[in-house]
Image: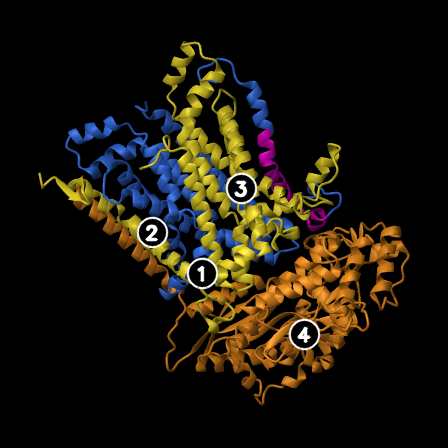
Chain colours: A orange, B yellow, C blue
Amino acid sequence: MNMKRVIMVLLASAILMGVYAQGQNEGKPAQSVEPTGPVKLQVWYALSGASGQTFVGQAQAFAKEHPEIELELTYSGSYADTATKVSAALLSGTAPDVAVMAAAQLYTGGQGNFEMESLVKDKDFDINDIYPGMQQYGMFSNRICALPYGISTQVLYYNKDIIAKSGIDLSTPPKTWDEFLKIAKATQQKGGAEYGFDTSDGVWLIKSMLSQNGNSIVEKKGDKVNPTFNQESGVQVATFWKKLVTEGVMPAGQHDNSEKKFLAGNMAFIAATSSRISKWKGNTSFALGAIPMPGFKKQSLALGGNVISIITTDKKKTAASWKLVKYMMQEPNQSAFALATGYLPVHKSSVNNPAVKEKVAGDPLYKVAIGQLDYAWAYLSFSEMGTMDNLIWGTLDEIEKGITEPKQAMDKAASDLLKEMKD
Amino acid sequence: MSERKMTIGGKLYDKEQLRAATVLLLPLLIAILVLFIFPVFRVVFYSFSNYNLIKRNDFRIIGLDNFTYLFTDVKFGKALRNTFTFALSKLLLDTSIALVVALVLDTRIPLRHYLRSAYFAPVVVPIVASSLIWIWFFDPGIGPFNQIRAFLGLKPSQWIYGEKTALFSIVLFSIWKGVGYNIVLFLSGLQNIPDSYIEAAQVDGATNMQILWKIKLPLLRPITNFVIMMGIINTFKVFAEVNVMTPKGGPLYSTSLIVNYIYEQAFTNGKMGRACAASILLFAIIYLLTLIQNRMNASKTIDVE
Amino acid sequence: MAKKRKHTNWLGFVLLTAGSLIMIFPFIWMILSSFKTVSDVYAYPPRWIPSHWEFDNYVKVFQMIPFGRYYLNSIYTSVMQTLMEITICIMGAYAFVALDFPGKKMLNSLVRSTMFVPTIVTLIPMYVMVSKAHLVDTYAGIMLPQILSAFTLYLLVSFFSTIPKDLFDSAKLDGCGYYRILLNVVIPNSKSSISTAVMFAFLGHWKSYTWPLIITNKQQYRTLPIGMKYLVQESSSEYQVMMAASVMAIVPVLVVYMIFEKQLVKSITLTGMKA
């Protein structure tokens, strides 16, 4: 009698569990594609806040015009989280059809999926209207695997109140980093700033600086990728970086805190992403300004941000996805997205777009960001990019804290990277 | 006789017990099989391969290469050292503080309920939220902790930004977050000690100290062992707070624990094979430590052996 | 330090209260911050009291993320997982304590070894397995992989072992089968321990982070810890909104804990033979 009771309890719990499992499957995406009928696309986007809302707005407008295509839009988190999820999803066949994320080309071209390269030859799409530097941003092995969507560069923001107090005139902004260093110091001596300068993304900034000094960071030799950041031109940059700390202008190892400090009014200059324009405008307790980034031998800025790419390999879904991508990438739409968010327009023809013209004229911060596009470029995409970024971060840390000399630190990072690439 | 007993492997068992055991243990066994054994086998398999999340087309078995890499990797060595330092400090401080607080809470004090809730409260907080609060606290410039230090006449500390202080800062946070757990465990153990024992001892004229050492602590032994064992296991599993407060491994990689190392290898570098190898090593370390702990308490564990 | 002593332990009280202030100080700060304005948050030197009480922050939380939904998801998954876990563990713990069966030692080692594996280690194989079963973005997919807990099992084992043998023996003499003993002897006598185990299990599930992060892509299945993380990203410069969300996430759980606690103490004092 006891046996029966126990078995009944077990059966009941098993049934309950099954019921719950079944009952919650309504949200399950339809994996099987019907031969006829509407297409459902899974779209993941790593865009938060205003960027996400703008994107969703446009995507929904697209869906209205195309009733045969159904969109399921999901905010997939930060770039890092999205990358993890896409990796895992690719393993199990549950990857999205379209993704707006950073380095999507690693998950398309990197897997041998160069479908986008043929798609962009579409008559309705003018790939050459996109700034060449930005086209590069979505390439893998020199082939197009993604299109630049939410593109940004770093912008050198400054606290107008501190600058005014220091009696500095920025109407002719400094062209070289050495000049800039002097100005930053002055803000500390005369303007009451705790620190003159910092950046919330040291790796990004140093890539720009390397390029400004004529260094290519890495180079492709046939099949292999070789680090070049430890060449003499790179060591010079690293040495300057160290100088920023030893002269007391930049705090050591506190980049994660830099935006907080800047917003608190403690810091004169900060190099942060252009997408902060929409977040900070009107939200700072001081007047906010921006100047073009100084350079070394020349001016140059590394591009950052996200790309849009088609991950699915299913023919029907690819065709539908391309319609969506084309729509989002059309100059008026993409430019509208950029304007609403502080990202940058990717089309050369956007300079003729009246909305863009208006914004550039009315927003000095945006004007600076757009002005920098003339010398923006994309660094090479390769599989160990993430590892390299991590290594460089550690290198900067060691240099800033005086643990290792710039040359040794750069050499070590280069040899570590080579070691990682061997597998 | 054969109706009630059965011999398996040379030992005599009661049939009714066997039947009951089968039914009662079935769900557990299924869970272990599906949720543990199967994934672990795959992890072991992957650890001998070059499984890469980003470059998936080039899958090969590479034998012990991952392991040799780990043994020669400076970062892995650092992660190991960090983990042991972290575990030792956290364990010692956490257990002793929890024990003391529980002992005091067990005495006659007012507002016991509220006090106990106060100590337990941090356990309940979402890690992301509390890590963010503490990041602010740790800020060398505008954070309250350095304000307090200044108030006490101490020099400001770099907290999670200094390579010498970062790990300890995280230990502090971890203790704040976790000590309530152990306090509750110790308290329930203390409250299981029958009043009659204590009264008898008092009648015999024992002092509080004697009662503490001769009655309470020994009777708390099973709980203490449990707390320490769980402490070892849990500190080796710590991940979230390090990941949130020092996402890149801390200044000069001084806060990365083994789990963070595994995460970095797997998800930033895509090197799943290597991450799996490191997981195996982690597993082995934890297992060894608990074995050692068990040996040391052989006669007094509440175990089924 | 016996309970029957007449004098209150004032020294202990003072020390403990001081300690407790340290424990709850971050919460006070969090609650205060949840009412601050942006400029309060970034003010230097730091402000403790908001310049004016910005209740809007709480509204903003709901505007930025589907907070209510996340909350419900957390409650649902935590409760269900706890139920399943406790059921499995009560049955298993009882078997370990009261029954003799072949392979006991081996099973014990096996169960113990499951504790040594952080979620992250089995993450990818679990994910592949779960997605092949089409359980990504489902409640079952979130819950089922997390119902194995050696911790709960051992907690119950150590508590069950303190049940005096004579209770078992007398029940057997009365002709009870093993299931009856479980239901009528073991469970009633371990109410407090089971409550403790339930509480810990619930908490563990409530806070669970790594697995739900990777197994849910769609908003409607996300649990609270994941939701909080997304909120951080959405509102990275609106610290005060994050604090408001934290307050809403924590206070109810604390209340539940405090309710549970009273019942815990009650059942401890009510249980009889514990010698």
Residue B32's mark?
A: 2
Q: Nearer the viewer, residue B248 or C170?
A: B248
Q: Secondary structure at mark 4?
A: loop
Report how far apart the C-alphas of labels 2 and 1 lie in the structure: 21 Å
Q: Chain of mark 3?
A: B
Residue at position x 72%, y 44% from top? B142
Where does label 1 land, which residue? B47
Q: Nearer the viewer, mark 4 or mark 1?
A: 1
Q: Residue drawn 15% across and 42% down?
A: B15
Q: Amino acid at mark 4?
A: Ala
Residue B281, relative to residue A368: is it above or below? above
Mark number, residue B87 = 3
Which SS class for mark 1? helix
Query: Which element is circle 2 on?
Result: helix
Classify C269 as above or below A212. Answer: above
CA distance separating discs 2 and 4: 49 Å
2 and 1 marks in contact (CB < 8 Å): no
Q: Judge the density around disc 2: few (<14), some (14-19), many (≥20) Cα neighbours within 10 Å.
A: some
Label 3–label 2 contact, CB within 8 A? no
Question: Farthest bottom residue?
Answer: A123
Q: Are marks 3 and 1 on the same chain?
A: yes
